[in-house]
Amino acid sequence: MAAGFQTVSFLSDYGLEDEFVGVVKAVIRGIAPGAAVIDIAHQVPPHDVRAGGLVLARTMQYLPPGVVLAVVDPGVATERKAVAVEVGGGLGEDGDEEPRSVVLGPDNGLLAPAVALAGGARRVVALTNEEFHLPAPGPTFTGRDVFAPVAAHLCNGAELDELGEPLDPNLLMPGILPLSRVEEGAVESEVLWVDRFGNAQLNVDPAEIDDLGSPLVLRMGERSRTAVRAVSYAELSPGQVGLVVDSYGLVSVALDRRSAAEELRLGAGDAVRIEPAQD
Amino acid sequence: MAAGFQTVSFLSDYGLEDEFVGVVKAVIRGIAPGAAVIDIAHQVPPHDVRAGGLVLARTMQYLPPGVVLAVVDPGVATERKAVAVEVGGGLGEDGDEEPRSVVLGPDNGLLAPAVALAGGARRVVALTNEEFHLPAPGPTFTGRDVFAPVAAHLCNGAELDELGEPLDPNLLMPGILPLSRVEEGAVESEVLWVDRFGNAQLNVDPAEIDDLGSPLVLRMGERSRTAVRAVSYAELSPGQVGLVVDSYGLVSVALDRRSAAEELRLGAGDAVRIEPAQD
Amino acid sequence: MAAGFQTVSFLSDYGLEDEFVGVVKAVIRGIAPGAAVIDIAHQVPPHDVRAGGLVLARTMQYLPPGVVLAVVDPGVATERKAVAVEVGGGLGEDGDEEPRSVVLGPDNGLLAPAVALAGGARRVVALTNEEFHLPAPGPTFTGRDVFAPVAAHLCNGAELDELGEPLDPNLLMPGILPLSRVEEGAVESEVLWVDRFGNAQLNVDPAEIDDLGSPLVLRMGERSRTAVRAVSYAELSPGQVGLVVDSYGLVSVALDRRSAAEELRLGAGDAVRIEPAQD
């Protein structure tokens, strides 16, 4: 019994300068007037599948059940597949049915981390049934011509298996989530994300550095800085570098009211080695 | 029988730094709580009527029937008219009534290309009836004080002829859509738009260059580059310039995963001459 | 009889690069699917409480009754309180009940100007009841973990006094609204806001400068420029500086189709002395 969905959560690298996001929403509204679209973020750096996958992974648990549409698609108009991935919908431990969502996007690794966090893919189809697509004046805007109408039809109650050929969930392109490593009493980590405030999120669970004490030393290539563990940004004195547990529960490098990423010249993907401070 | 509308599609040069867009939506929501607003785009370069008109023309066919509100208005608070233009609503070839929309905006050429694409203006009124406006603390924000309340009242079922004085549709300010020219076996074109990914859309239909073969030569002022016809961005090798049929069915200058506009120093309005490559 | 609310108007300094705004909306949608969220603005400069408070004050009168959520919160995860402030809801002069809104945000002065414009706080509570919050993986994203769920529960009909401890409205942190001064036949003013078009809004009521005539002289530090009073931007000749009554009824420094702030090197907080021109 597919009752359809009420919400499309939408992530892309379309930016907000052009009309791409607006046109996708207009197409959804034209087909499924009752569905609401929530913009997750659209300023993922162009073609940056890794960054988009990380945004989707961070947000997935907060999205209402529904359609999740994610488009960062450097391989548009090539052989890469456009897919719909069903997650949830099984019976939970209490015997009740869990909420079901359908994640739409290109099969290029973008969806994989979020799908894994949602318990894995239950069913996957390639979006090959053109009855659910718009006629395309050109092949390069699948957000408008394929994903938007498919999202809208899912809201209207279309069944997954109507949308195209079933695929083996095990053959989905995996995503790349860099792991930190503990090495000789230090933690080798990587910057996952620099946010608007200049906080640099590391792929480090707070427990991983608990044994290293505070203060600590951050080594970034040839440079190094002392940092302290802190709960809030405001408890850092001017110029003091803090390691704060951020809102996603990961360790992030921060300053109070200033950009740590700018001051420490950190960007997504940069390596940061965390060591105990020498006495 | 005017049943009103459910959707306001909204384009402007208000940007997203300030609260202009939010206030317009708040005013609409206060008057017509059941109407949804779709943001087409708000980062049209300030006062750039040509760019705004092109965005509206590109998106018009994808907008759901309803109110279309477009504001790029360098002549605000002068004698330029604020207008409502009815499009559609006639009987189609099959005898059924076609969807009707009302396009709102300043009469400065912004609306003209989209209105023409929608089959032309059926009726036009100047928005002179102040009963449908908000009291204005100053005369420079007609989006908030005139267009937003009028859009909302249209959603609520207001009739076009209540909104103000009828105008002759033939006297609407025309828009400027630059045409390409075929000249001595070459095509003289112009960049209509550079998108976020750096693709430079030309005012060229693919059929216009079919006889020129591939590769081709692009002449931009004193500079020139060789380009090849391509279907997808990804089939271009690094550094290779492609002419790709874009998502609106026009020829666009592109690179794979890099900005062609930046590399070739192309901006909106620039001239590009397309020639067959010499053997 | 709390009937709840239909609309959350949302202001923040979260920017649009990251997913912060989207996650807040996703959380609201998950709890209160029937509520609509209106984005007032999210590009308030990071941590700029003064700028955020001014945006909120400018927009407050245009917001539909409902929940108003404002987050510019440099002191997140410290002792500063998260509050809900009830405004309106009393009996108006005609004996009818006035619309009621609840303003949510940090108690750091951000809310004060808007609350004052809305007639002052009727009731205030600190958001201490964690039953209305989300479990937080880290303490730094109260927008998601505290304000969003509280906003949604208010929409669903939660009573203010369920949300936490009552506070004395007189103890709310005051906001800072700079006042202009008349001095020796001149007006000492300050730039409140530079908008996207480069207009520099001053804290000056038009009546304050009526006696100074036109043209006038603007003194900005060591620099000075002649300016004329004007109704529209378009009536200014190229290069002519105008003092225009802006859309909020305040005097603003403007050029026609160019940025006055850039040309005159004006930014928020800068002092501008307005004098009569010498004969």
Image: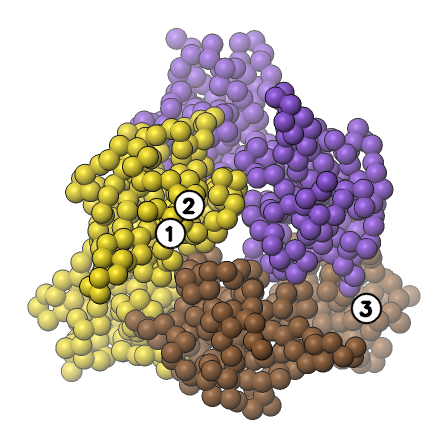
Chain colours: A brown, B yellow, C purple
Across and down, in percent, residue A261 comes to: 66, 59
- Give the SS element for disc 3: helix
| Mark linked to residue B155 | 2
Callouts 2 and 3 close, C-beta under 8 Å: no
Look at the numbered disc 2 and give the secondary structure of its residue: helix
Q: Which residue is mark 3?
A: A206
Q: Is residue C247 left or right of residue A170?
A: left
Q: Which residue is mark 1?
A: B66
Q: Earlier in the sequence, mark 1 or mark 2?
A: 1
Please, which chain is the residue tagged with disc 2 on? B
The front one of B110 and C266 is: B110
Residue at the image position 64 percent from the left and 45 percent from the top = C5
Q: Are marks 1 and 2 in contact (CB under 8 Å)?
A: yes
The three-letter amino acid code for the residue at tag 3 is Pro
Do marks 1 and 3 both belong to one polypeptide chain? no
How would you rate the neighbour count of disc 1 (Cα within 10 Å): few for under 14, some for 14-19, many for 20 or more?
Answer: many
Q: Amino acid at mark 1?
A: Gly
Could you say whether the residue bearing mark 1 is in a helix, strand or loop?
loop
Going by the image, does B187 lie left or right of C163? left
Amino acid on which disc 2 is placed: Cys
Q: Quadrant of residue A140?
A: bottom left
Distance from the alpha carbon under mark 1 to that under mark 3: 52 Å
Disc 2/disc 3 C-alpha distance (Å):
52 Å
